[in-house]
Amino acid sequence: MNKNLRKAVIAGNWKMNKTRPEAKALIEELKPLVAGADCGVVICVPYTNLETALEATKGTNIAVGAENCHWAESGAFTGEISAAMLKELGVQYVVIGHSERRQYFGETDVTVQKRVRAALDAGLQVILCIGELLEQREAGITEEIVGMQTKVALGGVTEAELKNIILAYEPVWAIGTGKTATAQQANEVNHYIRTVVEGLYGKAAADAITIQYGGSMNAKNAEELLDQPDVDGGLIGGASLKAPDFAAIVKAASR
Ligand code: PEP
């Protein structure tokens, strides 16, 4: 597999953090720190911060994403936001299938697939999260789990549409826990996911797709993780809330 075929993307997932003034301050601090980065830089922010983020990042190399979207175009889905609404705002990316959505909000592989479809149809770029629970890793079924999640989520996605998808391997046991997968564990699973994509779409598509690692990536461990041949960037939670830490990860990906 040739890493030079793919550009790394570092995406922040702010989760349910930051009021609008706090969001603006964080982005203003981040802008000069990541200007000229040689990797994609994305911040995925709460819905209430999207306009603030879009305004503050105008003319910069920072792209803006949302953290979820619904699968329907519109209708009686109280509290939900459609992909078309995000697109109309000017949002470029959306995170789909984050483990916190799966864990706390009943997200399943099937609803993930529906959301992916809606996001692609609306013209958004998708950061699609997959990853095993600790018990699944301990039972030796990590590959079966991430393979199934990948296959179901990509059901109906054409090879042409795949260029609008970033996969993010996020072992659930490593998210927000301070427990990072070793660089070798991250690379092994990312490599396996690439073979799944190859089985579905062929080698060229597998070589071209960006597969991030996410799970307690920080300024200290980013370089080793990002050096792995199949790790094409990161989805960053906690460390994306501090501009210097996020910028250090962007720097590590830009080498
Ligand atoms: C995430 O939210 O996707 C994530 C990886 O979080 P953290 O970096 O805090 O583990």
Image (tube, grey):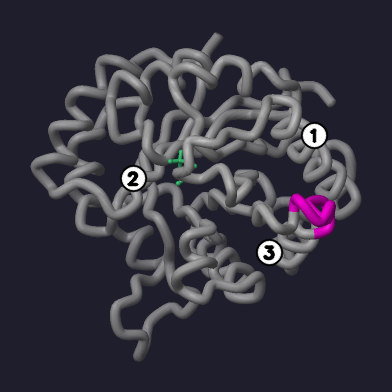
Total numbered circles: 3
Mark 3 and mark 2: Cα distance apart in space: 23 Å
Q: Which residue is mark 1?
A: 188
Q: Residues within 10 Å of mark 3 (few under 14, many from 20)?
A: many
Query: Where's residue 127, x and y in %?
Result: 54, 49
Q: Is residue 139 magenta?
A: yes
At horizontal 34% and vertical 75% (from top left) the residue drawn is 80
Q: Secondary structure at mark 3?
A: helix
- Spatial separation of the CA atoms under disc 3 and disc 1: 21 Å
State the SS at label 2.
loop
Q: Amino acid at mark 3?
A: Ala
The segment highlighted magenta reads 137-144
Residue 184 vertical position relative to residue 16 in the rendered view, above or below: above
Quadrant (top left/top right/bottom left/bottom right) for the N terminus: top right
- Residue linked to disc 3: 153
Instruction: Report the residue at 35% width, 90% height from top.
Output: 76
List x then y, in percent, for residue 101: 47, 65
Name the amino acid type tagged 1.
Glu
127 is higher (above) or lower (below) than 115: above
In the image shown, does 59 or 77 lie closer to the viewer? 77
Residue 57 placement (x, y as % from top left): 25, 33
Please name the amino acid that badge 2 sits on: Trp
User: Mark 2 and mark 1 in contact (Cβ < 8 Å)?
Assistant: no
The residue that label 2 is drawn on is 14
Q: Residues within 10 Å of mark 1 (few under 14, many from 20)?
A: some
**Which mark's residue is nearer the viewer, 3 or 2?**
2
Residue at mark 1 to residue at mark 2: CA–CA distance: 27 Å
